[in-house]
Amino acid sequence: MSQRRLSALLLVALAILLGTIALDVLLPFVRLPVAPLPDLLQNYVTIFLGIFIEAAPFLLLGSLTSGLIAEFVSADDVARFFPRHRFAGTVAGALLGVIFPVCECGVVPVVRRLYQKGFPISAGIAFLLGAPVLNPIVIASTYAAFGLGPVFWGRILFTLLIATGIGLVFSTQPNLARVIAPRTLVPIIGGVDGPQVPLHGSPASVSPLPLPRQVARSIPSRLQNAFSIATDELFDMGRFLVIGSLMATTLQTFIPQPALIGIGRDSVTSVIALQLLAFMLSVCSTVDAFLALSFVNTFTVGSIIVFLVFGPMVDIKSTTLYLNVFRPRVVFYVVTLCFLSTLLIGVFINLNVAW
C-alpha cells in the first residue's frame, strides 16, 4: 500500500513539474483571454498557498525524522538514554529541539513516533511546545531580527519555562490512554516498524503486539523502510495540515486585522491582540521573528514576546495536528494553559518591567 502511495505521489509531483515547465514555454506564444479571479477569492488562494507552502517542507522534515526514529531508535534506547527523573526528563524534552530542529508542524509526527517508543508523556508535551522555539534555526532567526536583547532572551527563557511547566502538569496523569489518542498507540501503517513495548498505563487492547524477532538487515534496506514509514506518516498528517491551513486562511480573510492592531499600546489588550493574531496567522516559527519586528513601534514589548512564545506553541494548523496525537480534551487543556500562562507573562512584563 505504501509503495502505491509513494508511486502516486511521485507521479503527481512529476506531472506538476512537467506542467509548470510546459506553461512557462508555451505562455509567451499563446494569447488567451484573461478572466481574473475576484479580489477576495484571489486573496484567499494566495494566503492559503503562503501558509501551506511555508509549513509543508517542515512537515516533510518531521515525517522523515519520524521514519528514521521508527527504524533506528528502539524503546530500549529511549529507556536507556533519556532521564528517568520526572523534572529532569521534562526539561530534557523541552530542550530536545536542539537535536531535532523542527517547527510546530514537523514536531508533531516526531512526538507521535517517540510515544510509540515509550517516551514519557510529560517529556513529549514539553518537546511539542518547546522544540519550535528551542532549536538552532529559530534561535538564529530571532537573533538576526532582535539581537541579544530582551525579546531574544525572553522568548527562549519563557518558552522553556512554559513548556516545562505544562509538561509537569501532565506528568501527574498515570494513565496514558486518557491523554493520548488511540491512533497514537498503534504504529503507523507502512514499513516494518521495530518491536513495540506496551505503554505504561495504557490498556492492553490498544497496545501494539510485539513483532517477531527481526533478522539483521543492511543499512540501505533499513533506510528504504524508514522512507516508507515517513511517506505514510506524511499522508496521515498532511490532511490535518490542509484543514488547519484552510481555517487559518478563512480567519485571516474575513476578520479585519487592523481591528486587532489598533489596540497595541494597552498593557493587557495588546497581549491578547497579538495572541489572537499569532493564532490566526499560523506563521512558521522559523520566520515569525521578522514579522514580529514590524510590530516594534506599535505594540508593547510584553506582547511581542508573547507573540513569539505563544504562536509556535499554539496556532490553528498546529492545533489540528495535535488532535491527531492527543484526545480532544487534552488539546483543549494544552491550548488553554498556553494561552493563560503567556497572557500572565506578557501582562506582568508590561506592568512591571521598563524596557
Image (cartoon, grey):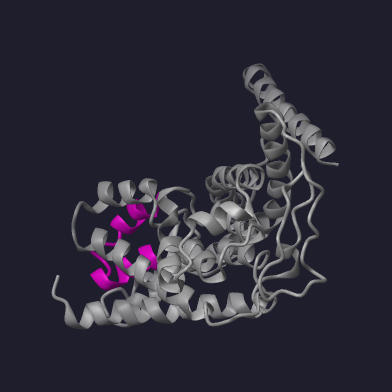
Rendered position, 185 above or below 165: above
Query: Residue at the spot x=69%, y=34% of the render?
Result: 222
Rendered position, 206 above or below 348: above
Residue 217 image position (x, y, % from top left):
72, 32
Q: Nearer the viewer, residue 42 or 55?
A: 55
Residue 43 image position (x, y, % from top left):
56, 52
Characterize the magenta stretch by its predominant secondary structure.
helix
Query: Residue at the spot x=62%, y=48% of the render?
Result: 66
Q: Is residue 169 left or right of residue 181?
A: left
Quadrant where the N terminus is found in the figure: top right
Q: Nearer the viewer, residue 71 or 79?
A: 79
The reply to whether residue 350 is in sight is yes
Q: Decide whether residue 307 is among the magenta residues.
A: yes
The reply to whether residue 257 is in sight is no
Q: Is residue 331 left or right of residue 19?
A: left
Residue 111 image position (x, y, % from top left):
58, 58
The magenta span reads: 287-309
Quadrant where the C terminus is found in the figure: bottom left
Q: Which residue reaches farthest left?
A: 354
Instruction: Tally the marks.
Output: 0
Tell me where residue 30 sits by quadrant: top right
